[in-house]
Image (cartoon, rainbow, N blue to C red):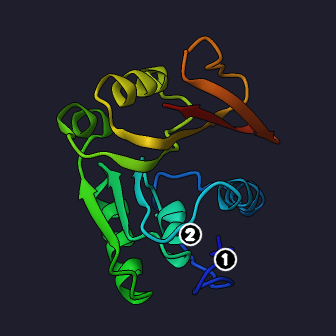
Amino acid sequence: MRIIGGQQGGIIIQAPTNLPVRPTTDRAKESLFNILQNRYDFENLSVLDLFAGTGNISYEFASRGASEIYSVDENANCVKFIKATAQKLKFENIQVIKQDVFSFLHTCTNQYDIIFGDAPYALTRMLEIPSFVFNKNLLKASGVLILEHASALKFNHIAQFKEERVYGQSCFSFFYV
Protein backbone atom coordinates (compact mmCIF):
# COMPACT_ATOMS: atom_id res chain seq x y z
CA MET A 1 0.00 0.00 0.00
CA ARG A 2 1.12 3.55 -0.52
CA ILE A 3 0.22 7.05 0.57
CA ILE A 4 -1.37 8.69 -2.47
CA GLY A 5 -1.10 12.42 -1.72
CA GLY A 6 0.01 15.14 0.66
CA GLN A 7 3.38 15.61 2.38
CA GLN A 8 4.19 11.89 2.38
CA GLY A 9 2.63 11.12 -1.01
CA GLY A 10 4.35 8.24 -2.80
CA ILE A 11 5.64 6.54 0.35
CA ILE A 12 5.14 2.77 0.24
CA ILE A 13 4.17 1.06 3.47
CA GLN A 14 4.69 -2.67 3.84
CA ALA A 15 2.37 -4.16 6.46
CA PRO A 16 3.28 -7.45 8.16
CA THR A 17 1.55 -10.44 6.57
CA ASN A 18 0.21 -11.63 9.94
CA LEU A 19 -2.26 -8.74 10.32
CA PRO A 20 -5.94 -9.74 9.88
CA VAL A 21 -6.66 -6.98 7.36
CA ARG A 22 -7.85 -6.18 3.85
CA PRO A 23 -6.45 -2.69 3.15
CA THR A 24 -8.35 -0.36 0.85
CA THR A 25 -6.81 -0.63 -2.61
CA ASP A 26 -4.77 2.29 -3.90
CA ARG A 27 -7.22 2.79 -6.76
CA ALA A 28 -10.26 2.93 -4.48
CA LYS A 29 -8.43 5.14 -1.96
CA GLU A 30 -7.34 7.57 -4.68
CA SER A 31 -10.93 7.82 -5.92
CA LEU A 32 -12.24 8.37 -2.39
CA PHE A 33 -9.75 11.13 -1.65
CA ASN A 34 -10.50 12.83 -4.98
CA ILE A 35 -14.14 13.02 -3.88
CA LEU A 36 -13.21 14.30 -0.40
CA GLN A 37 -10.71 16.82 -1.71
CA ASN A 38 -13.49 18.50 -3.71
CA ARG A 39 -15.67 18.79 -0.58
CA TYR A 40 -13.28 19.47 2.30
CA ASP A 41 -10.24 21.50 3.22
CA PHE A 42 -8.20 18.83 5.00
CA GLU A 43 -6.51 21.23 7.39
CA ASN A 44 -8.31 21.32 10.73
CA LEU A 45 -10.37 18.21 9.96
CA SER A 46 -11.14 15.82 12.78
CA VAL A 47 -11.27 12.23 11.49
CA LEU A 48 -12.35 8.95 13.07
CA ASP A 49 -11.00 5.82 11.36
CA LEU A 50 -12.96 2.76 12.53
CA PHE A 51 -11.54 -0.74 12.03
CA ALA A 52 -8.26 1.03 11.21
CA GLY A 53 -6.35 -2.19 10.43
CA THR A 54 -3.03 -1.16 8.87
CA GLY A 55 -3.79 2.56 9.33
CA ASN A 56 -3.89 3.02 5.55
CA ILE A 57 -6.72 5.59 5.62
CA SER A 58 -5.35 7.34 8.72
CA TYR A 59 -1.96 7.87 7.06
CA GLU A 60 -3.63 9.36 3.99
CA PHE A 61 -5.56 11.88 6.10
CA ALA A 62 -2.42 12.68 8.12
CA SER A 63 -0.35 13.21 4.98
CA ARG A 64 -2.96 15.63 3.67
CA GLY A 65 -2.94 17.73 6.85
CA ALA A 66 -5.94 16.60 8.93
CA SER A 67 -5.39 17.99 12.42
CA GLU A 68 -6.79 15.07 14.42
CA ILE A 69 -7.07 11.45 13.41
CA TYR A 70 -8.34 8.81 15.80
CA SER A 71 -7.61 5.25 14.63
CA VAL A 72 -9.66 2.59 16.38
CA ASP A 73 -8.93 -1.14 16.15
CA GLU A 74 -9.18 -3.97 18.65
CA ASN A 75 -6.30 -6.05 17.27
CA ALA A 76 -3.13 -5.52 19.33
CA ASN A 77 -0.84 -6.17 16.34
CA CYS A 78 -2.70 -3.65 14.17
CA VAL A 79 -2.52 -1.05 16.94
CA LYS A 80 1.20 -1.68 17.41
CA PHE A 81 1.81 -1.38 13.64
CA ILE A 82 -0.16 1.88 13.32
CA LYS A 83 1.66 3.44 16.27
CA ALA A 84 5.08 2.42 14.91
CA THR A 85 4.31 3.60 11.38
CA ALA A 86 2.82 6.92 12.55
CA GLN A 87 5.93 7.52 14.65
CA LYS A 88 8.25 6.59 11.77
CA LEU A 89 6.41 8.97 9.42
CA LYS A 90 6.24 11.68 12.13
CA PHE A 91 2.43 11.77 12.05
CA GLU A 92 1.86 13.30 15.46
CA ASN A 93 -1.79 13.95 14.57
CA ILE A 94 -2.71 10.23 14.77
CA GLN A 95 -4.05 8.90 18.07
CA VAL A 96 -4.42 5.11 18.17
CA ILE A 97 -7.12 3.53 20.33
CA LYS A 98 -7.13 -0.20 21.07
CA GLN A 99 -10.80 -1.00 21.56
CA ASP A 100 -13.70 -2.83 19.99
CA VAL A 101 -15.31 -0.38 17.56
CA PHE A 102 -18.83 -0.91 18.90
CA SER A 103 -17.70 -0.39 22.50
CA PHE A 104 -15.89 2.76 21.38
CA LEU A 105 -18.97 4.09 19.56
CA HIS A 106 -21.17 3.29 22.56
CA THR A 107 -19.07 5.51 24.87
CA CYS A 108 -17.87 8.14 22.37
CA THR A 109 -19.00 11.74 22.94
CA ASN A 110 -16.73 13.59 20.48
CA GLN A 111 -17.84 14.92 17.11
CA TYR A 112 -15.89 14.45 13.89
CA ASP A 113 -15.86 15.98 10.43
CA ILE A 114 -15.31 12.59 8.79
CA ILE A 115 -15.94 9.11 10.13
CA PHE A 116 -14.58 6.32 7.97
CA GLY A 117 -15.31 2.66 8.63
CA ASP A 118 -13.84 -0.32 6.82
CA ALA A 119 -15.06 -3.32 8.78
CA PRO A 120 -14.31 -6.90 7.78
CA TYR A 121 -16.71 -7.63 4.93
CA ALA A 122 -18.16 -10.62 6.81
CA LEU A 123 -19.12 -8.49 9.83
CA THR A 124 -22.89 -8.66 10.16
CA ARG A 125 -23.02 -5.70 12.57
CA MET A 126 -21.86 -3.30 9.86
CA LEU A 127 -25.46 -2.17 9.35
CA GLU A 128 -25.52 -0.88 12.97
CA ILE A 129 -22.79 1.71 12.46
CA PRO A 130 -24.95 4.48 10.92
CA SER A 131 -27.41 4.18 13.83
CA PHE A 132 -24.60 4.57 16.37
CA VAL A 133 -23.16 7.57 14.53
CA PHE A 134 -26.42 9.45 13.97
CA ASN A 135 -28.21 8.56 17.23
CA LYS A 136 -25.18 9.70 19.22
CA ASN A 137 -24.66 12.81 17.05
CA LEU A 138 -21.01 11.95 16.34
CA LEU A 139 -20.74 14.02 13.16
CA LYS A 140 -20.28 17.77 13.01
CA ALA A 141 -22.84 19.80 11.05
CA SER A 142 -21.14 19.36 7.67
CA GLY A 143 -19.74 15.92 8.47
CA VAL A 144 -19.84 12.70 6.52
CA LEU A 145 -19.86 9.02 7.43
CA ILE A 146 -18.19 6.82 4.83
CA LEU A 147 -18.42 3.04 5.02
CA GLU A 148 -16.37 0.75 2.83
CA HIS A 149 -18.06 -2.60 2.31
CA ALA A 150 -18.76 -5.40 -0.12
CA SER A 151 -20.77 -4.08 -3.06
CA ALA A 152 -23.58 -6.58 -2.35
CA LEU A 153 -24.40 -4.84 0.97
CA LYS A 154 -26.87 -1.97 0.61
CA PHE A 155 -27.53 0.99 2.93
CA ASN A 156 -30.02 2.93 0.79
CA HIS A 157 -32.83 2.26 3.30
CA ILE A 158 -31.11 4.50 5.89
CA ALA A 159 -32.38 8.10 5.93
CA GLN A 160 -28.93 9.73 5.96
CA PHE A 161 -27.63 7.61 3.05
CA LYS A 162 -26.87 9.81 0.04
CA GLU A 163 -24.75 7.91 -2.47
CA GLU A 164 -22.52 4.94 -3.14
CA ARG A 165 -19.47 4.52 -5.32
CA VAL A 166 -18.45 1.05 -6.47
CA TYR A 167 -14.84 0.06 -7.22
CA GLY A 168 -14.69 -3.60 -8.18
CA GLN A 169 -15.85 -5.69 -5.22
CA SER A 170 -15.62 -2.70 -2.87
CA CYS A 171 -18.15 0.01 -2.33
CA PHE A 172 -18.12 3.34 -0.45
CA SER A 173 -21.44 4.44 1.00
CA PHE A 174 -21.75 8.11 2.00
CA PHE A 175 -24.07 9.38 4.74
CA TYR A 176 -24.62 13.03 5.63
CA VAL A 177 -26.20 14.76 8.63
Name the quarter where the N terminus is drawn.
bottom right
Considering depth in this image, is 65 or 16 the residue closer to the camera? 65
Give left or right: position of 64 versus 162. Answer: left
Q: Residue at x 61, y 20 (%)?
A: 155
Residue 22 to residue 89: above or below: above
Give left or right: position of 38 versus 118. Answer: right
Q: How many angstroms separate mark 1 from mark 2 (CA)?
A: 7 Å
Residue 92 to residue 130: above or below: below
Considering depth in this image, is 157 or 102 the residue closer to the camera? 157
Is label 1 in a helix, a strand or a loop?
loop
**Residue 3 seen from this side:** yes
Q: Residue at x 59, y 56 (%)?
A: 23
What is the residue that sits farthest to the left in this orientation? 107
Q: Residue at x 37, y 61 (%)?
A: 78
What is the residue that sits farthest to the right in this orientation? 168
Kindly check if marks 1 and 2 are in contact, taking CB atoms under 8 A apart as contact.
yes
Please give the residue where the numbered disc 2 appears in the rendered image: 60
Q: List x then y, in percent, for residue 82.
A: 38, 69
**Residue 16 seen from this side:** no
Q: Which numbered tag is attached to residue 5?
A: 1
Q: As shown in the figure, which amino acid type bears the numbered disc 1?
A: Gly
Sequence-wise first label, 1 or 2: 1
Q: As shown in the figure, which amino acid type bears the numbered disc 2?
A: Glu
Is label 2 in a helix, a strand or a loop?
helix
Q: Residue at x 46, y 61 (%)?
A: 18
Residue 35 to residue 163: above or below: below
Q: List x then y, in percent, for residue 28.
A: 74, 54
Instruction: Assess disc 2: are there few (<14), some (14-19) or many (≥20) residues with their C-alpha within 10 Å of its C-alpha.
Output: many
